Amino acid sequence: MVPNAMHLAINAYFWDRPDTGSGQYVRQLAAHLTGLGGDLRITLVAPRQLEAADHPLPAACTWHTVPGRPGDLGKVLFEQFAFPRTCRELGADLALVPYWGSPLRSTVPLVVTIHDLIPLLLREYRGGPLGRLYTGLVAATARGAQQVITDSHASRDDILAHLGIPADRVWAIHLAAGDHFRPGPPDPAVAAKYGLPDGYTLYLGGFDLRKNLETLLRAYCHVGPAIGDDFPLVLAGRPVRSRSPRFPDLEALIRELDLGEYVRITGYVDEADKPAVYRGAAVLVQLSHYEGFGLTPLEAMSCGTPVVVSDRSSLPEVVGAAGFALDPADVEGIAGAIIACAIQEELRADLRQRGLEQAARFSWKRTAEETLEVLRRAVS
């Protein structure tokens, strides 16, 4: 029989990192799981150096810290030893690791969320020997979990193909945008803070290789001369100064392509400012070669902003028929889609409406409900 009451212990290593996908996921999931009511009790387990004081805990959640060491070694020791030991000592019915870092051995039934297989599938992201060793470790530990959750059907297909976990133990549960991502008026204060013009094409995210910003910049060789004065390209994020195969020199490419008058780099955007940054854009572009889940275009659609995405991995799954999904190497097609979104008012209005309808299909409440079903399955 599936118990109605459950004590769930969650690995909260990323709780104080809301700027990361894993940090947003654990916070939203904890809040919405407890919001479902019933007899679910959650203990968030974290190394002692992490603090929850600045971030109020959801109802029915308690904070439990254990001694820990900083750095990568400390993270592995927490995941592999301190967290499963604490779950046992707390008498938890179930342990949830909300990122790819589950313990190799656990006396408590275990569920792990694998958001993507980037370090396994993309050569530039595998790191050195220690990074590859860690990926091998967490790949092995995932096979021992009672259930595995992932963010999209595309990621589920990757897990089935590369980790060898039986299909009846892997569940695709979509994420959602936060409630603060919604249509609204312009925010002059946010525009001034980041130097945003009245209209622009927006990219928001990291500047690493899989984000495919080189193709976006090459597309702006066509967009810039046509509409770049009125709709410059805004790259919202913090450039990485160190050069490696994983982080191309985008500023050098901007100079090489002579795009300086059409491209602006804002630097890091605070989480609270993102909705206003989306709302001010004529179009959001994300041409990634791989995404475990397309949260950025989902947030943009929730704000009423049209989107242009690549037709790879999870992005078409998230956007559906509400935006343009194109080959990430199709420079001219991408340029045409950007120009159309920017200057064709009827098209933009249609995409805005379709985007809002598509975004409404995703909710954290639904994510929590489907996750709870998997959690209960793990202890049945």
Image (cartoon, rainbow, N blue to C red):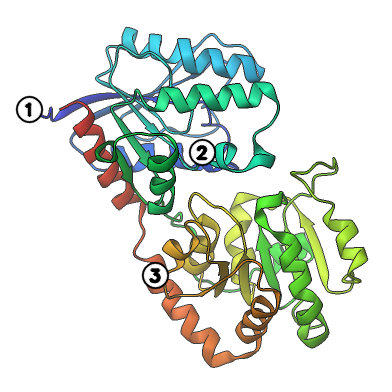
Q: Which mark is residue 358?
A: 3
**Image mark for residue 38:** none
Identify the residue at image location x=53%, y=31%: 14
Residue 362 is left or right of residue 279, and the answer is left
- Amino acid type of the residue that numbered disc 2 sits on in the rendered structure: Ser
Residue for badge 1: 1
CA–CA distance in space, label 1 to label 3: 37 Å
Q: Position of residue 380 (x, y in %)?
A: 15, 28
Circle 2 is placed at which residue position? 22
Residue 12 in view here: no
**Residue 90: x percent and y percent?**
32, 11
Q: Position of residue 158 (x, y in %)?
A: 44, 45
Q: Residues within 10 Å of mark 3 (few under 14, many from 20)?
A: some
**Which quadrant holds residue 222?**
bottom right
Q: Against 219, is 369 above or below? A: above
Amino acid beneath label 3: Gln
Verify CB contact (< 8 Å) between mark 2 and mark 1.
no
The amino acid type, in three-letter code, at marker 1 is Met
